[in-house]
DNA sequence: ATAACTGCAAACGTTTTGCCAGCAT
DNA sequence: ATGCTGGCAAAACGTTTGCAGTTAT
C-alpha cells in the first residue's frame, strides 16, 4: 500500500470487528451508571471496584473504541483532561470554574445555530460544541475555599 | 498567612508588576501578526526566527501572563493542545475536523444564550464557549489527503 | 536594590504505544 | 488459525516547575 489516507484508515476501522469482552461491558456499564462525566482515570477507579486487575491502557482503548462507535461521548472539553459521557446523545455541558465539576444542561441542542453560522465562515459546518462555565451550587456558596 | 485562598492568589497576581521584556514584546508581536491561532510550540517557532535563543518555557510563561491580563486569548479548545489568539475580543471559532486548522467565525457573540441556559441548570453561569467543527475549504475539496 | 525574568533541564500528568500471551470466533 | 484483546511497561506528548544567573526599573 503506497499511501495510507484518512479513507484507508476509515476502511480499516470498519474492518475491525470488536468483540464483546467483559472489560468493555463493565466499562460501559459503569459509565452509564454515573452522571459525573468521569475522566479515564476515574473510570478506571470505578471499574477496578469490580475488576481489580484491569489496566489503565485497557480503559483508554475501550473508551476510545466506544466513542468512535458512537456508543458514548468523548468530551474534548476545556480542561486539560478528557472526560467521557455515557449519554451519547448530543447535549450541552456546564463546567464549574472553581472545582472543575461538569454537569449536563437540560436543554435542546440549538440546531439552527449552525445554519446561522454557515454564512459567517467558509468552512462546511457539520457540528458544534457549546460549553458554559460558571459556579456550581456548592462553589457559589463558598467562593473562597481555604486550601490546607 | 494561614490559608492561601483563590482570593489571595488573585491579590498576589495583581501585586505582580510585569516588566516589558524583549521576549514578551516579540511573542505578542508575532502572535498579533498571525491569524492562525498557533499552539505554544508554533509561537516558539515564529519567535525563534527573530530570537533564536528563546526557550519554550519562556513562551509558555508569557502566553500565560498575557492571557491572564486579557491581552491575548487562550483557547482551551477541543484538541489536546492549547491555542492562542492575538485577538482578545470574544469571538467564536471553527475547527477543521481533518487538518485541525482553527479559524475565526465572523459573527457577534450570542449574549442571550447564557440567560436562556440559566434556567436549564443550577450553576451560576458567567460565560460560554461555542466552537463549530467542519471541513475547511481545502479539506472539503480533497477529503482523502494522501499521507507521505 | 529588588523583584521580575530567562534558559535549561527535570518533573509532571495524561494519553498512546509496542510487545507478547491469552482468548473468542 | 485468525485476529481482536488485555496487561504491563515504556514512550510520547504538552505543559509546568525549580533553580541559578540576568535584567529592567
Image (tube, coloured by chain):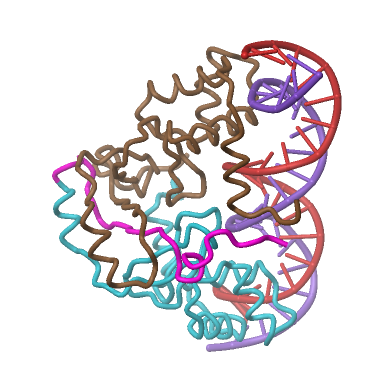
Chain colours: A brown, B cyan, C red, D purple
Which is nearer the eye, B55 or A69?
A69
In the rendered image, residue A53, in percent from the top left (x then y), is placed at: 65, 16
The span picked out in magenta is B119-148
Point 43% across, 25% down: residue: A31
Q: Quadrant of residue C18?
A: top right
In the rendered image, residue B146, in percent from the top left (x then y), is placed at: 65, 61
Q: Quadrant of residue B114?
A: bottom left
Above or below B144: residue C8: below
Q: Is residue B137 magenta?
A: yes
Point 29% across, 57% down: residue: B128
In the rendered image, residue C5, in percent from the top left (x then y), is placed at: 61, 76
Above or below A111: residue A142: above
In the rendered image, residue B4, in percent from the top left (x then y), is placed at: 44, 49
Point 53% across, 15% down: residue: A49
Q: How many marks?
A: 0
Horizontal side of B81 relative to A90 (left or right) equals right
Horizontal side of B45 relative to A50 (left or right) equals right
Q: Is residue B135 magenta?
A: yes
Which is nearer the eye, B146 or D24?
B146
Q: Quadrant of residue A122?
A: bottom left
Which is nearer the eye, B69 or A88?
A88
Above or below D9: residue B18: below
Horizontal side of B106 relative to B111 (left or right) equals right
Which is nearer the eye, B94 or A45?
B94
Point 57% across, 80% down: residue: B27
Horizontal side of A104 relative to A28 (left or right) equals left
Above or below D4: residue A113: below
Amino acid at each position: 500500500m503506497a499511501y495510507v489516507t484518512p479513507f484507508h484508515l476509515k476502511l480499516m476501522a470498519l474492518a475491525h470487528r470488536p468483540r464483546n469482552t467483559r472489560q468493555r461491558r463493565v466499562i460501559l456499564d459503569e459509565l452509564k451508571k454515573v452522571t459525573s462525566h468521569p475522566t479515564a482515570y476515574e473510570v478506571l477507579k470505578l471499574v477496578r471496584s469490580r475488576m481489580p486487575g484491569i489496566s489503565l491502557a485497557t480503559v483508554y482503548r475501550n473508551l476510545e473504541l466506544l466513542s468512535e462507535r458512537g456508543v458514548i461521548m468523548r468530551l474534548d472539553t476545556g480542561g486539560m483532561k478528557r472526560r467521557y459521557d455515557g449519554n451519547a446523545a448530543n447535549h450541552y455541558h456546564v463546567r464549574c470554574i472553581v472545582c472543575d465539576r461538569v454537569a449536563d444542561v437540560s436543554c435542546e441542542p440549538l440546531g439552527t445555530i449552525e445554519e446561522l453560522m454557515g454564512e459567517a465562515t467558509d468552512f462546511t459546518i457539520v457540528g458544534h460544541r457549546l460549553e458554559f462555565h460558571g459556579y456550581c451550587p456548592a462553589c457559589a456558596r463558598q467562593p473562597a475555599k481555604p486550601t490546607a
